[in-house]
Every structure is written in C-alpha cells, then in structure tokens.
Image (tube, helix red, strand yellow):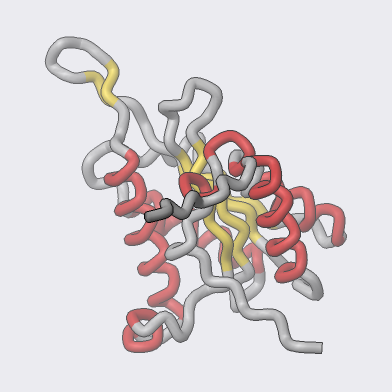
Amino acid sequence: MSINRIKLIPKHEEQASINEWLLQRIENQSQAVFVTLKFRHKINEQKQKDDISTEHAKKLLRIFLRKLDGLFYSERAIKKRIAAIPRAAFQHMGLSGDNVHFHLIMFPPIAAAEFVEIAEKTWANMDKFGWIDTHHSEFAVVGATELDLRKATLYCAREVRKLGLEDSWLIYETHMPAIAAA
C-alpha cells in the first residue's frame, strides 16, 4: 500500500500564482476602491487586552459584504452567488500575528467616491458591540492609473507569502468575474 503525498507548494509560489490571477482579472477595470477593515481591542474584567477571534471577524466581514451586495443586487442572486460586487478579499494578521484585519479591492457598480461613502457608513453602522474600529479602517478610491490599481491589488494579497494562500485568501468572500476566453 502506498501513501500519496501532496506536494506542498512553497508560499512564494502561492504568492506569485495569486498575484498573476488577480492581475489578469483587474485588467480593463476603470474604477476601484481599496478597503481595510480593522477591529478594536477590548479590555476585559482582568484589565487585559482581548482581541476579536478570527472567526468572529470573518462573520462581521461576511455581514458587511452581504449588506453592501444587498444594496445593488437581489437577495436571490446573492444567495446563489450569481451576483455580488466584484472584489478580492484577503485576511492579514499584522506584524504581531494576532491583529486580524482584512484588505479588499472592490469594483463598485456606481461611482467609486459614492461607494466609499456608502461602505464607510455601512461599516460604522455595524459597530453594535464595540469590535469595529472605524478610526483605523480605510475606504479609499484607487488612483486612475493602471499602476495605482496594480499596487492596491497586490497589497491586498501581500500576506499570502507569510500566511499561505489557504489562510490569507478569502475565496468565499471573493467574487471576481471569470476571464473571457480569447
């Protein structure tokens, strides 16, 4: 009986692969929004700092994205994953390895500046339990050049090299159009 071993792909190869995949999908995009979603630390009864769990942070991310998608697409289309705001989503852990936050590149169906206002308000309105850090979260229109878009997109995915593709790329929160066959 033989055991098949899965060849582990080095993280730098995963980084190169996701970068290539992303760059193919952002070609011909006219406007984009760069998003950073941050979370606060809370002080517990023992006067120690508590951080949000990764699972709870991901749940808040999914709620945020569902709320934004719901402004532009039908509930049925969203549930069936037929429609969503085109985006790529990545989890980052920061230098310390325990500062969970998210970076997204989004391609809104409306003017980018108008979308930024809507997204900021949506994120702020979700702060019911004190986890959401509206002060350090960022919603910014990406510059108009291809280089600006490229930099913002690759920044979103930069922790793949550190965390690995499986732990950084949020595949279920990503909704990018397929590339048309040439």
Where is the N terminus found, in terms of image quarters? bottom left
The residue that appears at 43% across and 73% down in the rendered structure is 69
Q: Position of residue 41 (x, y in %)?
A: 33, 26
Residue 28: quadrant of the picture = bottom right
Q: Position of residue 161 (x, y in %)?
A: 63, 39
Residue placed furthest toward the front: 1
- Above or below 104: residue 174: below
The residue that appears at 73% across and 86% down in the rendered structure is 180
Please indicate whether residue 103 sits to the left or right of residue 22 in the image. left
In front of the other: 88 or 11:
11
Residue 159: quadrant of the picture = top right
Residue placed furthest toward the top: 47
The residue that appears at 51% across and 46% down in the rendered structure is 168
The residue that appears at 65% across and 66% down in the rendered structure is 112
Count of residue discs: 0
Please indicate whether residue 72 sits to the left or right of residue 31 in the image. left
Please indicate whether residue 21 sits to the left or right of residue 63 in the image. right
Where is the C terminus found, in terms of image quarters? bottom right
Residue 10: quadrant of the picture = top right
In front of the other: 145 or 112:
145
Q: Position of residue 136 (x, y in %)?
A: 50, 35
In front of the other: 162 or 46:
162
